[in-house]
Amino acid sequence: MFKIIFGQTPHQYVLRKRMNKALDLLRSSEMPVTQIGYEVGLESPASFSRMFKIRYGISPDSFREQHNSFKYTFRTL
């Protein structure tokens, strides 16, 4: 029934929510990446990095670096 309503399994839904929260934290905080992984409920930094890279095609560290670089470039224009 859950999959019919939400179009994904409960596990996929929870993982999507966790990864969205991780994106928000990577963008808006200076919390260490390892802490973000624990904050969103993943068991280890390695599992967080792996899941993030599978979902977004980039590591959490690289995402943050690119996001911060974009913010800096935007502010200086």
Image (spheres, grey):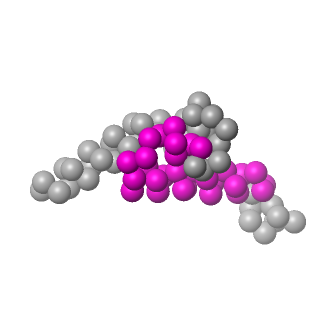
Question: Which residue reaches farthest top?
Answer: 46
Q: In the orientation shown, which residue stands out farthest toward the bottom?
A: 5
Q: Can residue 7 be seen in this view?
A: yes
Is the residue 52 above or below the residue 4 in the image?
Answer: above
Residue range in magenta is: 9-38
34 to the left or right of 5: left
Q: In which quarter of the image is the N terminus?
A: bottom right
Image quadrant containing the C terminus: bottom left
Q: State the residue at coordinates (21%, 50%).
A: 72
Q: Name the residue at the left extreme.
A: 77
Q: Is residue 19 magenta?
A: yes
On screen, residue 77 above or below 46: below
Residue 11 location (% of width, % of height)? 76, 51
Horizontal and vertical percent position of residue 22: 52, 51
The residue depicted at 74 percent of the width and 65 percent of the height is: 6
Q: In this view, does 6 lie to the left or right of 57?
A: right
Q: Residue at x 30, y 47 (%)?
A: 68
